[in-house]
Amino acid sequence: MPIDAKTAAHVARLARIRVEEERLPALAEEFSAILGFIEQLNEVDVEGVEPMVSVSPMRLKRRPDVVTDGSMPEKILANAPDAREGFFAVPKVVE
């Protein structure tokens, strides 16, 4: 898909990038090359290939999902500017 200088200028303006007028043809060429590569990727057969998160196969460490109180409420509430009865106290915002 060839990109012309007018389209390259439009993309540069949308990206808030200042491009000098004489650089627009080169930028349009680069955009065309990128889109050409993307078109090549569309031709690759990926049937049956599972998506990957990383190029190296790895499993994330898992831990049991257990709800706790944090085991240190006093330390946590010590950081609060105002704590009452074991909770953070915040000013009223809706009247």
Image: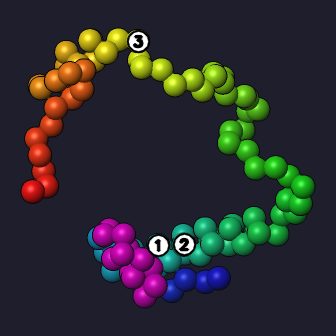
Q: Which residues are magenta?
A: 6-17
Image coordinates for residue 60, horizontal then vertical, percent: 67, 28
Viewer-nearest residue: 1 or 65: 65
Q: Amino acid at mark 3?
A: Ser
The residue lying at 46 percent from left, 85 percent from top is 7
Residue on which the image places disc 1: 27
- Label 3 to label 2: alpha-carbon separation: 55 Å
What x and y, as percent, mark residue 32? Answer: 59, 75
Disc 2: which residue: 31
Q: Quadrant of the C terminus?
A: bottom left
Q: CA distance from mark 1 to mark 2?
A: 6 Å
Name the spot of residue 94 as percent of width and height, x first.
Answer: 13, 55
Mark on residue 71?
Answer: 3
Q: Mark 1 near mark 2, Cβ–Cβ under 8 Å?
A: yes
User: Of the residues shown, which amino acid type is indicated by label 2?
Assistant: Phe
Q: Residues within 10 Å of mark 3 (few under 14, many from 20)?
A: few
Whether residue 24 is visible here, answered yes or no, is no
Name the foreground residue: 85 vs 78: 85
Q: Quadrant of the N terminus?
A: bottom right
In screen coordinates, is 79 left or right of 7?
left
